Image: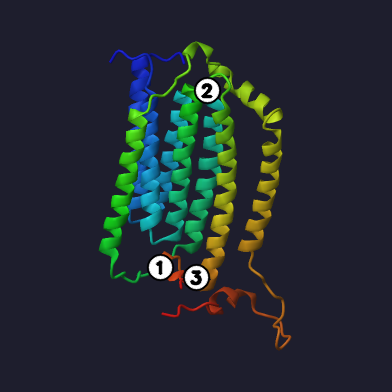
Amino acid sequence: MNLESIPLQAFLIVSSALFCIGIWGLLNSRNAVRVLMSIELMLNAVNINLMAFSSYIDNNLIQGQVFTIFVITVAAAEAAVGLAILLSLYRNRVTVDMESFNLLKW
Amino acid sequence: MSIAITTQFICFTVLSLVVIIGALGVVLLESIVYSAFLLGGVFMSVAGLYLLLNASFVAAAQVLVYVGAVNVLIIFAIMLVNKKEDLKPINDIKSRRVISTSICLTLLSLLIRVDLTNVWRLSSPKNSIGEESTIRIGEHLFSDYLLPFEVASVLLLMAMIGAIVLARRDVMSKDISTGLPVDQELIEKSSEPLLTNKN
């Protein structure tokens, strides 16, 4: 290969694949903890995307890296609150099966 | 970046393979504990990809926040809720799987098509600030991104208080109806689930 650097498309394809795996896990998991893990995977895919664009398209004013820092902050807050909600759900229903959380179903 | 291009390619291939296979393991493995540890591996490989993109600060933040905090939190949650239970079978599980898999594959092919057909206007590598990205991030955070930076601190405080309030167990020292002191050990075991499943 006589390329000067890794093409941008390679990073984009990896992040697309990671995002789709995250969506699949989100739709198909029975365990609520695994749903939270899938959400983290999707957030990481978005971060890879932002970092690749900031390195290839905006490599002087790397604003994508600042965005990634904010996404990491929000993801940490989301994980903490999500797992706390999960714990109180488990305390009330004694299960983490997503199929049994059907109180809002019409 | 000063690494030879062949080394960069090898690193990229290995890291992306670990990311994809690890992510598949996270969603497909039967045991949730294995999934959690594989998730840590995925986070570490993503940090490696950031290093390939000249972003050492974000890579360090990724390792600290994701591997050090989020993953540990997830493992603690698994430890607290890990009860063996027989899941009720769903009757139309097969059609659900087929539909969701086809949706994901369609989305993936759409995204890859956009990635490959769009003409990206790349900036020239000689403008790149390279290893000085940490300094530039600091400048951004204290000039044009100052408001989001401060709002993020408020958000973290709110998330911390919210998590404590949600996860706290209310322990009462005496029984409400009789006024007698409560045996604290039995609170967890004797409590009935508040919301029982209707069907």
Q: Earlier in the sequence, mark 3 or mark 1?
A: 1
Q: Earlier in the sequence, mark 2 or mark 1?
A: 2
Residue B154, given in percent of the width and then of the height, sits at 70, 46
Specify whether A57 is left or right of B5: right
Q: Earlier in the sequence, mark 3 or mark 2?
A: 2
Task: Kindly state the secondary structure of the residue where label 2 is placed.
Answer: loop
Dot 1 falls on which chain? A
Disc 3 versus disc 1: distance between alpha carbons? 12 Å
Q: On the image, numbered disc 2 is attached to which residue?
A: A58
Residue in the image at 53% along x and 17% along y: B130
Same chain check for tags 3 and 2 = yes
Is there CB contact under 8 Å for labels 3 and 2? no
Q: Nearer the viewer, mark 3 or mark 1?
A: 3
**What amino acid type is highlighted by mark number 2?**
Asp
Depth check, front residue: B6 or A105: A105
Specify whether B70 is left or right of A24: right
Residue A104 badge: 3
Above or below: residue A58 compared with residue B101 = above
Same chain check for tags 3 and 1 = yes
Q: On the image, numbered disc 1 is attached to which residue?
A: A99
**Quadrant position of the N terminus of chain A in the picture:** top left
Q: Residue furthest bottom?
A: B178
Residue in the image at 33% along x and 23% along y: B10
Residue in the image at 49% along x and 23% along y: A55
Above or below: residue B134 compared with residue B152 = above
Disc 3 versus disc 2: distance between alpha carbons? 44 Å
Note whether residue B51 is visible. Answer: yes
Disc 2 versus disc 1: distance between alpha carbons? 44 Å
**What amino acid type is highlighted by mark number 1?**
Glu
